[in-house]
Image (cartoon, rainbow, N blue to C red):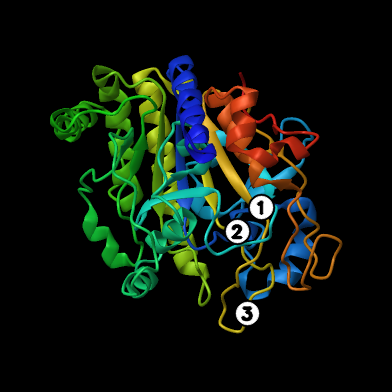
Amino acid sequence: MTTAGMGAVLGGLGAQKANAARSNGRALVCIYLFGGNDANNTIVPLFQYASYAAARGELAIAADELLRVRTAAGQEEYGFHPSLSELQPLFQSGTMAVVGNVGSADGAPSIDPSLRYLRPGYALPGWAAESAGVARLGEGSVMKDILNALPEVGDLVRKVPGALTAAAPQQPSPVYTGFPNPLAESRRTGNQTTGLAMLAPGVALPSQDRARLAPEMARAAASLRTAFPETGLGAQLYQVAGLLKAGRQFGMGNQVFFCSLGGFATRAMQLEPHAALLKELSAGMAAFYRATEEMGISQNVTTFTDSEYSRTLQPNRSSGTEAAWGGHQLVLGGSVLGGDVYGRFPVLSPGGPDDVTGKGVFRPSQSKDQYAATLATWYGLEYPELVRTIPRITSYAKPALGFVAG
């Protein structure tokens, strides 16, 4: 047996052991904000408001419009974007936290290497796919991941003979995609949503059971009293709620969901479209949390945002922003140690100690590796598996960020 073959066998055995041990019934729901969410307007440290307003110029949110909150630990005041009105009370009640100034350790790549791309518009957190033994697409899989995320480029490359090796034979998979989006017309708004992906470790249903999954999900979701917003993200989260409720009859224990919300590449005339996107995020997250409460599973479900990067503090000449680096993320759930901001916010001053370009591109104070490791540990990964799926976690003195309990 080749070394590569032995590695595949051992990796598969490790994944089987991990899946067998992972029976705590927990679920993670990633809401990925494609295009790079402008975290600088998502939440503002009010103790830096003067610096923020001076640097933001025409993109600054007026102080009296920001939704004020006070952190439980440090009693510091922050202001949420006015569109996040459904999330402000959840922060104040202690069920939502902010994880501040998170970013990739390697800079701000346009294709997020922490994701495992499945097909155009569909992905999973890379650590979750790896821990569940989800096969890559064969040799050259990193390139294939990228090409799947960029179909126009992929079409060109695939025309070159031998440019990519043949994909590995498809095995029964614990990955589920293709759920119907009842609100596909939301794409007309320019907010691209292509549906959701679900990972159910250790559960690779045969085709006849896969065919039953969507109808059972729809029935389960329709039985909920919680009203979901009629948006692309609302439709995806509605389906997640149905899958959480129906999944047990298919033998699903732990689950990971990946939802997408596009349109955050706000390079021109940013204020109105960004406000609309944050309203969609706020309404969807709040409705989904209420649904988990209705089902009695809020302690076992954690919802979190992610994005490629934040955007520049200084606006560009088109009343928009450019791709930056460190940004802030939202984490919501019954196990979240909420009401606080985790991590150090950057000094909001172009050319200041945290700015790497002079335009408000902030070096992260904590990495995406740590962010992912905190969520993965809560989900059920033990430390050896964590090291296997997030290898660089060993380089951090503080591998977990402490924003979720147990």
> Where does the image place residue 72, in percent across and percent down from the top left?
72, 30
The circle on residue 309 is 2
Callout 3: SS: loop
Q: Is residue 96 visible?
A: no
Q: Nearer the viewer, residue 403 or 160?
A: 160
Q: Amino acid at mark 2?
A: Tyr
Dot 2 or dot 3: first in sequence order is 2
Q: Local crowd at mark 1 within 10 Å, few (<14), some, or many (≥20)?
A: many
Q: Residue at x 68, y 56 (%)?
A: 326
Residue 27 versus residue 406 in the image, above or below? below
Structural distance between the alpha carbons of marks 2 and 1: 7 Å
The residue identified by callout 1 is 103
Residue in the picture at 66% in, 68% down: 312
Instruction: Identify the residue at image location x=52%, y=34%.
Output: 7
Q: Is residue 266 above or below residue 402?
A: below
How far apart are the two marked residues, 3 and 1, measured between alpha carbons? 22 Å
Residue 336: where, in percent of width, then height? 58, 27
Are the two marked residues, 2 and 3, in contact with CB atoms closer than 8 angstroms?
A: no
Q: Amino acid at mark 1?
A: Gly
Q: Is residue 216 above or below residue 151?
A: above
Check disc 3 and report the residue beneath it: 316
**Label of residue 151 in the image:** none
State the SS at label 2. Answer: loop
Q: Quadrant of the C terminus?
A: top right
Q: Earlier in the sequence, mark 2 or mark 1?
A: 1
Task: Please report contact status of discs 2 and 1: CB closer than 8 Å, yes or no.
Answer: yes
Q: Nearer the viewer, residue 317 or 353?
A: 353
Q: For the residues marked 2 and 3, what is the alpha-carbon distance in whole angstroms?
A: 17 Å
